[in-house]
Amino acid sequence: MNRRVFLLGAGGLAACARDPRPRLNVYNWSTYVAPETIPGFEAEFGVRVRYATYESNEEMLAKVLGGNSGWDVVFPTHSRIEAMRQYGLLAPLRRDWLPGLANLDPRFRSPAWDPALEWTVPYMWNGTGIAYNRTFQPAPQRWADLWDPRLKGRLTMLDDPEDMLGACLKKLGLSFSATDPAELRNAEREAVAQKPLLRAYLNAEVRDQLVSGDVLAAQLWSTTAQQAIAAAPNVAFTYPAEGFPFYCDCAAILRESRRTRLAHQFLDYLLRPQVSAQIVEATKTATANGAAQDLLPESVRRNPTLYPPPEVFARGEWPHTLPPAAQRLRDRIWTEIKSA
Amino acid sequence: MNLRSWFLFPARLWMAAFFAAPFAIVLAYSFLARGPLGGVEQPWALENYRRLFDPLYLEILLRSFLVAGAATAVCLVLAFPAALFIARASRHKNLYLQLVMLPFWTSFLVRTYAWIFLLRETGLINTALQAVGIIHTPLPLLYNTGAVLLGLVYGYLPFMVLPIYATLERLDPSLVEAAADLGARPVSTVFRVILPLTKPGIVAGSILVFIPCLGAYLTPDLLGGGRTVLVGNLVQNQFTSARDWPFGSAVSIGLMAVVTVCLWVFLRRESEPLA
Amino acid sequence: MKRWLAAYAVAFYAFLHLPLATLAVFSFNSSRFTVWEGFSLDWYRAIFRDPQIVEGTWNSIVIALWATAISTVIGTLCAYGLWKRGSRLLTGSLYLSLVTPEIVTGISLLALYQWAFRWLHWQLGLYTVVLAHVAFSIAYVVIVVSARLRTVSPALEEAAMDLGANEWQAFWYVTLPALLPGIVAAALLAVTVSFDDYVITSMVAGVDSETLPMVIYAMARRGASPVINAISALITVVFGVLILISERVREI
């Protein structure tokens, strides 16, 4: 089996230049599809999909800003969509080509960033919270608990200005997307006060250290936390009481694409319940597809980390793009915090 | 055109197309304003350069110079004996050289992660030391400046070894013999005969290490735990999460200006070992 | 003295290869995480099952070979030309290309390509990566070869020309052979720099030109995966074998 795949792959490479099938270029976050997803689409529609991945919105945006990147479908996070639309980067969606939209979870049928779903199709979503080791009692339930001196040297926060400052803002009872300079400076003070307790600012890399017990508490995304929980049962996750952000990665078609029909078919394919459920099973992410959720086993559907119950969901905020002045101030504050 | 002009032509062409032109673009960016998604837009202004002179950023620049300088010094001390060994080897010189390069054909990121694994509190080094009984509580080997230095030195060691080897290899062994005949002990020979003659290699290696170290961002980020900001992190941040390309461009231009001045001063005194 | 040097060399190589050895050991770990759980070849199998890795490796090799060949030639010629008579402009721009942070080089090259493509209607691809790699490799080659050139006496060429050789023959028959170890060292450096580059490559790579560092980076940023360890161990073994073979061939 492996050898055949390898040879096929090599042969595929060789035949690449002369492949007569239509092509679709998809640019997605890493580990966001199941191994069968793309080959399934290729087989059913008789096309070839060029699939590549990126690690951050900015990486993707740098490529597509020029308007001739070669990609057809991309997956921006919801907070970037408004600006992408204003820049004319997105192609409008034709709802009659997307019957699968009915499968979406009701909460995502008319989201704040795209109420009529004219430009994007919600794909996967996650939130930021606290992952912690159960041996640390009492268990952290609020952002404020991460300022506990007992955590010194065993605590990490995300290396992301939006999330890190956001946690400080929520601790103070302010909005996650605050723009007021005084509020931001107060948040900065909190961050600087916390810094001596921190081991480091880490993103997904902290997963291993949580599993091995090096780190007792970490600000972490729900998907990564779920991976840690699956590997070590004494790791737990909580959405803080003061509030927290949600992020939704949405599928969008670029205006520069000349294969909009095929792109729509791909988006509709992703909306199929079985396809979406398969992806979730492989990637352990939370899908915006309601019909797919129904296909998932009870334990996954009710997993509080990936699919928080309604009362927790209500405490979440959806960050949006900030005006340039606020963004500049935040950025400067981030540099100051890191240099402190 | 004489031979020299022909020889220089391809390099000139490449530099003009793929360095000067992009450099002009970066220069233009530094005078513009940020776009909401990244990218740049009007108006033209000196705003970014004014921001650069803020003490916060100057301190970052200074810190970067110190760290890069320390890394270069350590690299030099570590690389010189190794280069000497390879140059003096009677056989298998290329093999030894390639063995130096071998680790660097795997991904830089992967090697850095390997160091994280080794240096962590439950990592290999701490576990081994505790098992043997040398220490009883784990040493904080990671997420500090020391770890960053280690990572930088490790990452740029071949850049120091290769140029020094290239000059050492050419060294006339009769000079060393002469020194021995005149009564010099081996160590003394190294410092008073070999070292001065390998100056071009040392200078080349130092430049090849110091300058990229200034712009390094992955190593300080991963091994320093994101706790310090060096110039590389600052620039990287501007082009990614901060989405402030113009300011990032201005910082880069500032960095390049400072380095150019340093190099100019340094190389003039050293009577231009390179050109 | 020789014994001290040899002992030092052993310690030096141990230091260089320690992270690699660790990776190799843990590539056989059956657990995803860095606690040893048992011996397994799963991760090695996973490499060959993943077409992205196979293709990324192929692309990286092709790019590295092309970029090294071109940059070594251009860089050597340039170093020689500068040795004859300096050019402050060229030397300055070479140094500056070294000091530019990679992200800046990447973004500026991307901007350049996108601007050029407005007229040429081309797209990013393997060739844009090769062009970019040559651009940053030339400086390394020039510096290493120049260091070597400093040890070559101009008198040798003058002597050759007195004996009737023209400029080209003096270069080809007299100086170039003396330069060879320097050129080899420079080429090695260029291959390494090209094969390992992530930042610039990811910026200018096209739809079809994913390289191995890009694949590895994507995997690693999501939390270390043992597949990466397996890839690194494999690369080391493959290159190590190649090196040993070339050494044997040379001895024959």
Image: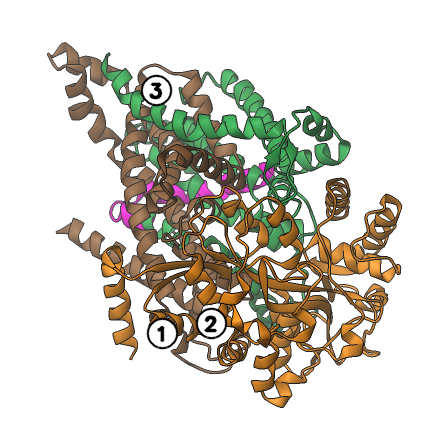
Hue of chain C? brown
Q: Do the dots labelled 2 and 3 sit on one chain? A: no
**Chain for mark 2?**
A
In the drawing, does residue A319 fall left or right of residue B75? Answer: right
Q: Which mark is residue A269?
A: 2
Residue at the image position 24 percent from the left and 47 percent from the top: B91
- The earlier-in-sequence mark between 1 and 2 is 1
Asked whether, in this view, residue B215 is left or right of residue C168, the answer is right
- Magenta-drawn segment: B68-96
The numbered disc on residue A44 is: 1
10 Å crowding of disc 2: few (<14), some (14-19), many (20+): many
Residue C42: give its label.
none
Which quarter of the figure has residue A327? top right
| Same subunit, tags 1 and 2 | yes
Examine the rendering and report whether any part of residue C173 can be seen: yes
For this rendering, which residue is in front, A74 or B134?
A74
Colour chosen for chain B: green
Is residue C23 among what the camera can see?
no
Q: Comparing marks 3 and 1, which lies closer to the viewer?
A: 1
**As shown in the figure, which amino acid type bears the numbered disc 3?**
Leu
